[in-house]
Image: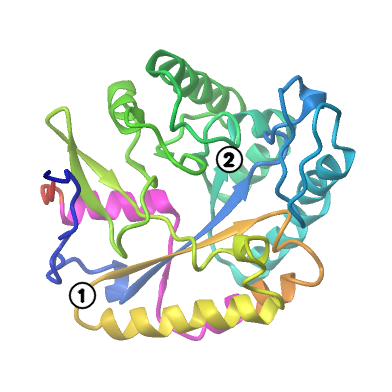
């Protein structure tokens, strides 16, 4: 049986692309905005989200504890995180669920003022893996319409929570206007995939340099653990970046790193990174640069 997957990638020979100002490493901070898009019986959903500071499933009745954990991200965590980025002068890509944007429209207004990118994180904080194709097509169109109404323009990036469906990428290309998606975790560099005869750009995301590890198995405990682990990745990629381009995605969540006991880890990380020659970039900027510098490199 032949497995139709690309295990080879660049084969250790990535394209000779240099980042702006000849930087060795592109650093992409992604702040996930999912508050208001979580599953909740109070919102008419059949079940409640069960992942917050603990894993806990409340069946058949509203989970007010879970809802308040998500609310914290919008009410307090968001502003604490944005203050850290304002002080550091670092740009952001915000992965925003379209329904969450309806609940927190000030996020779009703030992003417009700061010049941050809003990438679409789906309509809900949900997997698309088993979603029927017609439902997913309509959902993508609904997301784009919501972004235009609240943000003033359509998103150019897409990132599904958990697994995309086998149709997601095809539907993004079909819809048009999307420069990239981040529904992959398989490389340290952007790469192309051919969809319906067209090259489509993929900017892989990262789960290890991600504050979700405070929740999942409690791999990280102290804020400094997040800083230390991420800086180890930075050191490795900076060394490799002397010979070939490298990209690092750092994933954040308002309700996680925005807590008082964790925010210092982010502040320390930003201070540490500022000591190195890295390109702080929105994912849209990375995509446009790659499309210009390596426009026809299609690996599959």
Q: Residue 199 in magenta?
A: no
Q: In the rendering, at what x and y percent does residue 275 appear? A: 50, 86
Above or below residue 43? Residue 28 is: below
Q: Residue 123 shows which numbered tag?
A: none
Residue that appears at 35% across and 34% down: 178
Direction from residue 63 to residue 155 in the image, left or right: left
Q: Quadrant of residue 37?
A: top right
Prevailing secondary structure of the magenta residues: helix
Quickly name the residue at label 2.
Answer: 96
Q: In the rendering, at what x and y percent does residue 142 appear? A: 52, 19
Judging depth in this view, the residue of 124 and 48 nearest the camera is 48
Q: Which residues are magenta?
A: 269-294
Quickly name the residue at label 1.
Answer: 244
Direction from residue 142 to residue 235 in the image, left or right: left
Q: Quadrant of residue 152?
A: top right
Q: Count neighbours of disc 2 (C-alpha within 10 A) and say few if under 14, some if 14 to 19, many if 20 or more.
A: many
Direction from residue 9 to residue 161 in the image, left or right: right
Q: Earlier in the sequence, mark 2 or mark 1?
A: 2
Residue that appears at 49% across and 20% down: 139
Say which quadrant the C terminus sits in: top left
What secondary structure is found at the residue carrying circle 2? strand
User: How many marks do you count on the picture?
Assistant: 2
Judging depth in this view, the residue of 105 and 300 nearest the camera is 300
Q: In the rendering, at what x and y percent does residue 242 appear? A: 24, 83
Judging depth in this view, the residue of 245 and 57 nearest the camera is 57
Above or below residue 143? Residue 228 is: below
Say which quadrant the N terminus sits in: top left
Residue that appears at 47% across and 84% down: 232
Q: In the rendering, at what x and y percent does residue 103 appear? A: 74, 31
Residue that appears at 76% across and 19% down: 44
Q: Count neighbours of disc 1 (C-alpha within 10 A) and say few if under 14, some if 14 to 19, many if 20 or more.
A: some
């Amino acid at each position: 049986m032949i497995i139709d997957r690309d295990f080879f990638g660049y084969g250790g020979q990535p394209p000779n692309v240099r980042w702006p100002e000849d930087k060795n490493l592109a650093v992409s901070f992604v702040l996930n905005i999912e508050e208001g898009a979580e599953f909740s019986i109070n919102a008419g959903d059949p079940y409640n989200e069960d992942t917050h500071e603990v894993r806990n499933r409340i069946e058949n009745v509203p989970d007010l504890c879970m809802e308040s954990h998500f609310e914290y991200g919008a009410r307090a965590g968001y502003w604490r995180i944005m203050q850290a980025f304002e002080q550091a002068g670092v740009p952001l890509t915000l992965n925003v669920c379209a329904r969450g944007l309806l609940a927190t429209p000030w996020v779009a207004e703030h992003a417009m003022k700061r010049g941050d990118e809003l990438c679409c994180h789906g309509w809900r904080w949900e997997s698309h893996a088993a979603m029927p194709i017609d439902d997913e097509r309509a959902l993508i169109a609904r997301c784009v319409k919501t972004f235009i109404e609240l943000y003033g323009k359509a998103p150019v990036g897409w990132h599904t929570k958990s697994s995309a469906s086998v149709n997601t990428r095809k539907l993004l290309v079909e819809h048009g206007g999307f420069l990239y998606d981040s529904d992959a975790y398989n490389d340290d560099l952007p790469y192309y995939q051919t969809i319906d005869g067209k090259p489509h750009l993929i900017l892989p995301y990262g789960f290890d340099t991600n504050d979700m590890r405070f929740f999942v198995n409690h791999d990280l405990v102290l804020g400094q653990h997040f800083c230390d682990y991420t800086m180890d990745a930075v050191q490795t990629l900076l060394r490799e970046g002397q010979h070939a381009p490298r990209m690092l995605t750092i994933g954040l969540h308002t309700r996680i790193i925005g807590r008082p006991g964790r925010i210092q880890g982010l502040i320390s990380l930003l201070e540490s990174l500022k000591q190195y020659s890295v390109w702080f970039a929105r994912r849209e900027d990375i995509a446009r640069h790659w499309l210009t510098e390596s426009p026809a490199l299609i690996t599959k």
